[in-house]
Image (tube, grey):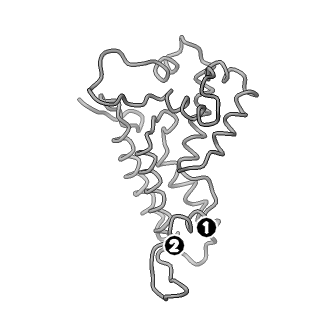
Amino acid sequence: MEQLKYLGTTLSTKNSIQEEIKSRFKSGNVCYHLVQNLLPSSLLSKNTETKIYTTIILPVVVYGCETWSLTMREEYRLRVFENRMLRRRDGLKRDSVTGEWGKLHNEELTDLYSSPNTIWVIKQRRMRRAEHVACMGERRGAYRVLVGKPEGKGPFGRPRYIWEDNIKMKLQEIGLGGMDWIDLAQDRDRWQAPVSAIMNLPVP
């Protein structure tokens, strides 16, 4: 068996997150179709539509994201999916100059919906999880799974990211690349400063 479902999460023998993300997209689409008759309603404000998205659809898409190890390619796929969801809500926009109908650009979507995007939510939850893992200690199973390195040889090519790599990479982006994040996360007050800095990093 190459993959299985456990507690709603797709686990793969190849330690790949791609199948899990595909599964999250399918579940997100199902949720959207359940509420699609509400979203285009002229009776709902943009704020209400955004709350429907962030409380019903988004939690389904990011379920289990605390343990994800994402590459730039997977982050891009998540952004594309989110933008597609947002465009479905607004339909087409008519150009004030040419009069032609077209889709909203990414920048326009960002201006319309200022709520935290998918990547922001994932980073926030992952950093919170990092703090919990660091405080567990080496004897706890969750600590060994998320921080440990698999035994044996992997396939040829570029090594896959592990969960801890994402934590180290974000700390490096804010100038704390050489710091022991496990030691830093032991102190909640000290940990909040880099977490806030990471949350403010621009999404490429």
Q: Left or right? Give the position of 188 relative to 100.
A: right
What residue do we see at 38% from left, 32% from top? Answer: 6
Residues at badges 1 and 2 in contact (C-beta under 8 Å)? yes
What residue do we see at 58% from left, 78% from top? Answer: 42
| Residue 2 horizontal/vertical position (percent) | 25, 31
Q: Amino acid at mark 2?
A: Asp
Q: Earlier in the sequence, mark 1 or mark 2?
A: 2
The residue carrying mark 1 is 112
Q: Amino acid at mark 1?
A: Leu
| Residue 191 horizontal/vertical position (percent) | 70, 29
What residue do we see at 60% from left, 27% from top? Answer: 177
Q: Residues within 10 Å of mark 2 (few under 14, many from 20)?
A: some
Q: What count of labels does the image hold? A: 2
Q: Residue furthest top?
A: 139
Numbered badge on residue 90: 2
In this rendered view, identify the residue nearer to me: 199 or 134: 199
Q: Residues within 10 Å of mark 1 (few under 14, many from 20)?
A: few
